[in-house]
Amino acid sequence: MGKEPPVMATREELKKIAARDEWEKFIAKGWRRTEGGWTKKKARAANP
């Protein structure tokens, strides 16, 4: 084993670059970031 970085580090970086490119395509088409309100869980009543 040499002092070279593991191959997986390169693969992860490529995924990040691809994701960034996709995000830029969405922005160019007019997409915008939204508030994540749907991720907040509301307390449910015991017997609605």
Image: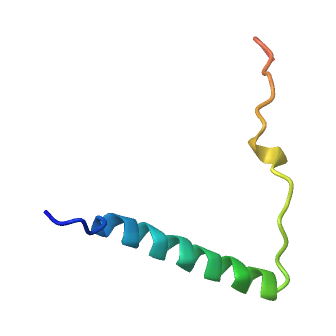
Residue closest to the eye, 6 or 44? 6
> Residue 37 at x, y = what percent?
84, 46
In this view, the residue farthest toward the left is 1
In this view, the residue farthest toward the front is 3
> Residue 3 at x, y = what percent?
24, 65
> Residue 1 at x, y = what percent?
13, 63
Residue closest to the eye, 20 or 41? 20
> Residue 45 at x, y = what percent?
80, 16
Number of marks present in the image shown: 0
Residue at 69% of width from left, 77% of height from top? 23
Q: Quadrant of the C terminus?
A: top right
Residue at 26% of width from left, 69% of height from top? 4
What color scheme is it?
A: rainbow
Residue at 28% of width from left, 64% of height from top? 6
Determine whether, in the image, residue 35 is placed left or right of residue 3.
right
Residue closest to the eye, 7 or 47? 7
User: In which image quadrant can residue 19 be found?
Assistant: bottom right
User: In which image quadrant can residue 42 be found?
Assistant: top right
Residue at 76% of width from left, 32% of height from top? 41
Residue 44 lies, with reference to residue 6, above or below; the image says above
Residue 42 lies, with reference to residue 3, above or below; the image says above
Determine whether, in the image, residue 15 is placed left or right of residue 34.
left
Residue 22 lies, with reference to residue 36, above or below; the image says below
Residue 36 lies, with reference to residue 7, above or below; the image says above
Residue closest to the eye, 14 or 4? 4
